[in-house]
Amino acid sequence: MKPALWAASVLLVACEAAAPVSGAVGVFYGGQVQELERIEVDPLRALTFGFRVDLPEPSRDRDHALRWEVVRPGPAGRRVTQVGELPIPAGLAQLEQTLPVDLREVTGLYNVRVLVDGQIVIDRAIDVRKP
């Protein structure tokens, strides 16, 4: 193999391996995740709140470990942390997960963090308010 061709193929493989895992957090609506900085909750209709993680092609050949955290307002001005873990099986291109949070319960600042294999994919704050 010619040195230039070999160097180009190594560079291509390195770029593919470095493709990051991406994600979005927000309200599920019509097959999409609406990423909003502020959510005004409807007291009569519960919103489906969660996240979506997209795995690039090179990352799909193995299993991954996902961990999520939601820090939200709690009783008496305290903050409540909810955590969860999910396995991501090999071959999966996308994972959607609803979060066990009823946004109508308590309004305020919600912090959502999602990690895949220990790397932060999502780290967002969302302001949840009543209309």
Image (tube, rainbow, N blue to C red):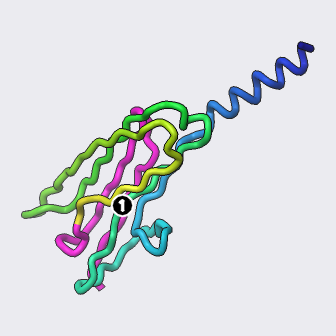
The percent position of residue 45, horizontal first and vertical second, equals: 27, 82
Residue 89, compared with residue 96, is above or below; it is above
Residues shaded magenta: 102-131
Up/down of 3 relative to 61, above or below = above
Residue lying farthest to the left in this orientation: 76
In the image, residue 5 above or below residue 116? above
SS for callout 1: strand
Q: Which residue is mark 1?
A: 50
Q: Is residue 70 left or right of residue 63?
A: left
User: Which residue corresponds to the image point at 45% horizontal and 55% vertical from the top-left?
Assistant: 52
Q: Position of residue 124 (x, y in %)?
A: 40, 55
Task: Say whether residue 73 is left or right of residue 3.
Answer: left
Q: Amino acid at mark 1?
A: Gly
- Going 24% across and 60% down the picture, which residue do you hit? 100
> Is residue 123 in the magenta section?
yes
Count of numbered labels shown in the rendering: 1
- Give coordinates of residue 63: x percent, y percent: 44, 33
Question: Residue placed at 82% from the left, 19% from the top?
Answer: 7
Q: Could you tell me which quadrant the N terminus lies in?
A: top right
- Residues 104 and 16: in front is 16
Residue at left 55%, top 35%? 59
Res 103 → quadrant: bottom left
